[in-house]
Image: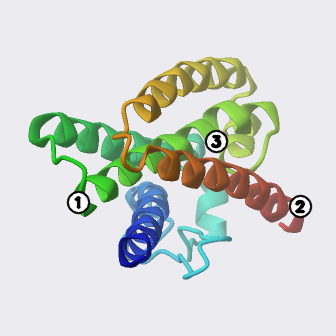
Amino acid sequence: MIHWIIYFVLGYAALFAVVWLHELGHSICHCAFGCKKGWLHVQVKPYIFFSTPGPVDAEKYQALSPAKRALSAYGGVIANLFWSILCGVLLLAVKPGNGSLSFFLWMFLTLHLSEIVSYLLIGSLYLVSDMAIVAGEYPRLRIPNFLLGALLTAVYIVVLGNVPSDFQWLVILWNLITILSMCGGRIAFSLLH
């Protein structure tokens, strides 16, 4: 029983870190483009939904060029890609086995990939959040975003297939719930704002 509690805590920690790093990716872009102070300051609540890279100076953001606004929108996905590659290399190099550290690393990797897939693939089908911003600035990027999302979905499925069998079903279940929640949350966030 105690190992399930540990897995739940580690899964939540991985998810929180993934969302925080995603928002940090946006925040770094906003700071670099002069529409935010304090790149480390992002808003990620314990319940994770409605996380933002804020506060961002809306007037300065609107004054940015379309390319900078699009790059700021991609900032989160770029951060997710960076951290998933780093974690994948770490897993290949260290091969941590089937313990708690392994579970955390597999969750960290797969949840970053789920974030990417939910934005590029699903977010290109139903434009919300970051992908709505990109499509608003550069409508022709919608198809390349979708195709890249489809390619990364194939990678994501392969990665999920390589999760150690001791906790593979738990990682897959957690990822499925996370993708459905993220997509639903983004739709709700977009409708509210």
Tell me which label, 1 or 2, sits earlier in the chain.
1
In the picture, which quadrant includes the C terminus?
bottom right
Element type at marker 1?
helix
Compared with 191, 79 (above or below) is above
Compared with 27, 183 (above or below) is above
Element type at marker 3?
helix
Element type at marker 2?
helix
Tell me which label, 3 or 1, sits earlier in the chain.
1
Compared with 55, 100 (above or below) is above
- At which x and y percent is residue 168? 44, 44
Question: Marks 3 and 1: which is nearer the front?
Answer: 1
Q: Which mark is residue 41?
A: none
Q: Mark 3, residues whose alpha carbon is within 10 Å: few (<14), some, or many (≥20)? A: many
- At which x and y percent is residue 150? 61, 21
* Residue, disc 1: 101
Res. 191 image quadrant:
bottom right
